[in-house]
Amino acid sequence: MKKNILLVWIMMMVTYPIRSQTVNWYALNAKEKHILNANIGTEYGVIFGLGYGYHFDNRFFPLIIGAEASIPSGNTLLDDFKVKAGAHVRWAKIHDVQFSTRIQGIFRKFENKNVAISNFGVDMAGVIGYYRPTWFAGGEVGFDKAIVTHFRHSEHYKEIYPEVKNGWYEPATGGNFYYGIQGGYSFSRQEVYVKLGNIVSQDFKTKPRLPFLVQIGYNYKL
C-alpha cells in the first residue's frame, strides 16, 4: 500500500501540466517569424522555462511551431526537467474574439532517492480570448496525459520492496485536466503575460500537491 501511494504521489508531480507559451494573435504580424519566450511559474515548486516558436503566417489559420523546456529551482539541475514540442493554431476569428488550439508531445524526467521516472505524454488545450493590438485576455482548458512511463528504482527502494520491477509501464499512467485565465500587454515586438488557473486530476478524486497554476512570461518577437 505504501509503495502504491508513493508511486501515485510521484506520478502526480510528473504529470503536472507544463506552462505553455502564450501569444497575442492580434499583435503578431506577418514579419514576426521568431518568438523567444522566458517564463517563471509554480508546479511543485518554482519552475523556470525557455521556449522558441516559428510563426507561419497564414491569412486564415496562422500557425506557431515550437519547442519549450522547463526545470525546477534546486541543487541538481537535470534530476527534474521537461521538454515539449508541437503546434499552436488559430482557427477562428470573429471581430476581436479568437479561438486557438494547441497540441504538444512531452518528455519529462523526475528523480528522487527512491525512483527515476521518464515519461512520454501529450498536452492538448483550447484557448478563447479577446485580443487587441496592445492587450489580450482569455480562458484556457486543457488536458495533460502521461502515455508511457519508465520506472528505475533505487537500491534503497528495492531493499524495502524487493518485488518491485524496473521497466516501461502501459497503458497510460496518469493525467490532469487544467483550466484558467490569461492576460497580457503587447508593445514594440514584446509581450508580458500572466496565467492563473487550477488543476483537476484525471480521476476527479486525487488532489495535486499544489492544485493551482501561476505563470509570468515574456515574449520577444523577431
Image: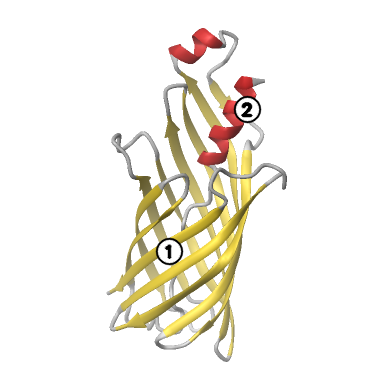
Residue with the mark numbered 1: 21
Q: Kindly identify the residue that appears in the image at 39 percent across and 80 percent down.
A: 185
150 left or right of 57 in image: right
Q: Kindly identify the residue that appears in the image at 34 percent across and 68 percent down.
A: 218
Distance from the alpha carbon under mark 2 to that under mark 1: 33 Å
**What's the residue type where badge 2 is placed?**
Ile
Which comes before the other along the chain, label 2 or label 1? 2
* Pointers 2 and 1 in contact (C-beta within 8 Å): no
Judged from the image, the secondary structure of the residue bearing numbered disc 2 is helix
Out of 215 and 168, give the one closest to the viewer.
Answer: 215
* Quadrant assignment, res 21: bottom left
Q: Is residue 158 visible?
A: yes
For label 1, the crowd category at 10 Å Cα-Cα, with few meaning under 14, some 14 to 19 and many 20 or more, is many
Number of the label disc, if any, that sits on residue 103 = none
Q: Check the image and name the residue furthest to the bottom.
A: 95
Q: How far across and down, in percent of the image, does residue 82 sit?
A: 42, 45
Q: Kindly identify the residue that appears in the image at 51 percent across and 57 percent down.
A: 213
Image height of 152 relative to 74, above or below: above
Q: Check the image and name the residue furthest to the right.
A: 204
Quadrant into which the C terminus falls: bottom left
Image height of 72 relative to 135, above or below: above
Q: How far across and down, in percent of the image, does residue 166 sit?
A: 53, 18
Give the colour scheme shown.
secondary structure
Number of the label disc, if any, that sits on residue 5 = 2
Judged from the image, the secondary structure of the residue bearing numbered disc 1 is loop
121 left or right of 24 in image: right
Q: How far across and down, in percent of the image, does residue 71 sit?
A: 36, 46
Q: Is residue 20 visible?
A: no
Q: How far across and down, in percent of the image, does residue 128 sit?
A: 59, 75
For label 2, the crowd category at 10 Å Cα-Cα, with few meaning under 14, some 14 to 19 and many 20 or more, is few
**What's the residue type where badge 1 is placed?**
Gln
Quadrant into which the N terminus falls: top right
